[in-house]
Image (cartoon, rainbow, N blue to C red):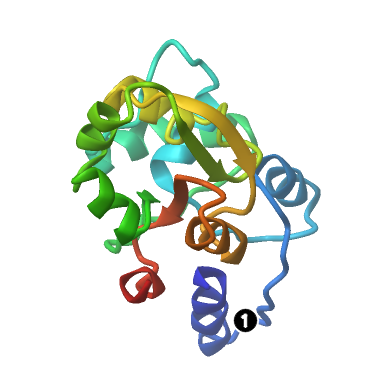
Amino acid sequence: MLATIYADVLSAAGFDATVQEVGNRELYLQALESGQIQVFPEYLSTLTEFLEDDAESEIASGDVDATLAALQPLAEANGLVVGEPSEAADQNAFAVTQAFADELGVTTLSELADACGDGSLVLGGPAECPERPFCQPGLEETYGLEFDSFRELDAGGPLTKAALQQGEISIGLVFSSDGALAQD
């Protein structure tokens, strides 16, 4: 877990650091503002778009420096301080089982959209996925995927992975740094 890595680094630097489960962005931002927690590892583009809160415009991009520059005033307006982004990348990723991909003969999201144009897919992920620009709306707008339904699970955790393996969902939100996926 990324938070544990940050806590270890802070502890090694002499801070008293512990890890606390705080939930989704709406909950942890309130916890930061109230002082209940002091640090939270976050995704640069996702936080930028969340704080910008305009579904019609997208100010985050693949350019880390430009996205950070756009985020700084938004963070300050919300009483937040943003640290220097890590060079490591952990991004939203979307997984299907190998059997499902083989059955359809697909290796990309665009190919999945072409193969399942009838809207028969079931997407699984966290409760906020249907509204987040880098989740369901992004899949629909960028790749042309159509979903029959959405199943509320966790963000890339054991519920999503189990639902994929058991065929309860067609595609699930996972994270690009999850080494366990290569084993499944």
Q: Relative to 112, is 152 on the left or the right?
A: right
Query: Residue at (72%, 65%) from the top-left corner?
Result: 21
Q: Secondary structure at mark 1?
A: loop
Residue drawn 53% across the image and 73% down it: 1
Residue lying furthest front? 103
Q: Residue at x 31, y 72 (%)?
A: 182
Amino acid bearing label 1: Phe
Provide residue 180's location: percent of width, then percent of height.
40, 74
Q: Quadrant of the C terminus?
A: bottom left
Q: Is residue 72 visible?
A: no
Which residue, given by chain and number where applicable, does mark 1 sit on? 15
Viewer-proximal residue among 41 and 178: 178
| Crowdedness near tag 1: few (<14), some (14–19) or many (≥20) residues, C-alpha within 10 Å | few
In this view, 119 is above or below 43? above
| Residue at horizontal 44 percent and vertical 10 percent from the top | 56
On the image, the x and y values in percent for residue 131 come to 57, 26
| Residue 141 % position (x, y) | 34, 20
